[in-house]
Image (cartoon, rainbow, N blue to C red):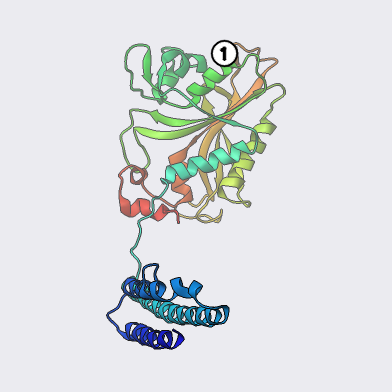
Amino acid sequence: MLEQFNKHAEDILNKIKVACADPNNTIDDLQQIFNKYFGVNSELKQKYTTKLKELNPEEKKILGQAINSLTKESESLIKERQKFLEEQKFLLSLEKEKIDITLEAKKMNHGSIHPINLVLYKIHDIFKQLGYTVIDGKEVETDLFNFEKLNIPKGHPAREMQDSFFIDEENLLRTHCTNATAHVLTEAKKNMPVRVVSTGNVYRKDDDDATHSHQFTQIDVVNLGQGITLANLKWTLEFFAKEMFGEKTQIRMRPSFFPFTEPSMEVDVTCVHCKGRGCAICKKTGWIEILGAGMLHPNVLELCGHDSKVIQGFAFGIGAERIAMLKYHVSDIRYFYNNDIRFLKQFKKF
């Protein structure tokens, strides 16, 4: 039986080698060929393995080893060929999926933050450092809070400074963010001190030109409490100017008039273009106006329910467009609202 097996084994091994050398045989084909000769129902199993029990121990040992040796050698040949085919398949897939790393990638259009928002975020960050709270105010406001509580009664000449869009006799589009100050002062009788920053759109019947717009963005800052003086206002203005325009920026305070503050002042900063040396932008003065400020008028405090002899405060209003024009060297306020991509993409964030 051993001689018969050896001839049969040699024939099987040759057929396995031929199958492995055939380039047309796939991985699955090779597995089927292996199962044909070494599977449960194969001739090898039926003719030799099942008859081992009929042999004496010595013959059983020799034949069993021969069967195992043939199976292992054949399996090794099959697996080696299958591994080769797997590698070829993988290399072929890489070739198909190859990426040319020298090929220029598609250019992606990144979004950008509007320059007015950039200014607002910066101003908010500055005042948050000082403990201020950022709030929103009403864009449609009553005459009471837009004017009367701010020491501008009906018929007062100061109303002519702010031509307004009235909706009806008692309601209008707010002309300044100071309306939020009136609300804060009225509601702050028991919550002292108060430090708030109000931001939003304001509306005035101005003719649009390079420096004026019927709608613009204003930031109103108010600090209310006991013992607040002009020195506190000056320090706050200096801190704001240095944080916004640079550490070497200086401020200049000039007397002015606002009905809701007394004393009132216009605040200038060192020209951001010439650094104070004098240029056409600052008209050779070295200074550029940026905001109006002052100590809260006693009448405003009284109208909002506070004892002006006990409670003091300061307030100032900042035009976001004004700051953006200075900071980004923009010559025409209308650029901010024309939605010109050529202009806006200069503020792209990467």
Provide residue 174's location: percent of width, then percent of height.
41, 23
Q: Position of residue 316 (x, y in %)?
A: 55, 31
Q: Is residue 163 above or below residue 288?
A: above
Q: Nearer the viewer, residue 141 or 264?
A: 141
Residue type indicated by callout 1: Cys
The front one of 331 and 185 is 185
* Above or below: residue 46 compared with residue 172: below
Instruction: Report whether 146 appears left or right of 212.
Output: right
Residue at x-position 52% and y-position 19%: 182
Q: Is residue 240 left or right of residue 121?
A: right
Q: Is residue 308 left or right of residue 220?
A: right
Asked if one can make out residue 103 in the rendered structure from this viewpoint, the answer is: no
Q: Residue placed farthest to the right in the image? A: 227
Q: Residue at x 65, y 33 (%)?
A: 131
Tell me if residue 83 comes above or below residue 251 in the rendering.
below
Q: Residues within 10 Å of mark 1 (few under 14, many from 20)?
A: many
The image quadrant where one finds the C terminus is bottom left
* Residue 343 rendering spot, x and y as whole percentages: 35, 52
Q: Residue at x 33, y 64 (%)?
A: 106
Q: Quadrant of residue 305?
A: top right
Specify the quadrant that holds the N terminus. bottom left
| SS at badge 1 | loop
The residue that mark 1 highlights is 304
Q: Nearer the viewer, residue 22 or 274?
A: 22
Residue 219 visible in the picture: yes
The image quarter containing residue 267 is top right
Q: How many marks?
A: 1
Q: Report x, y in % for residue 104.
A: 34, 70
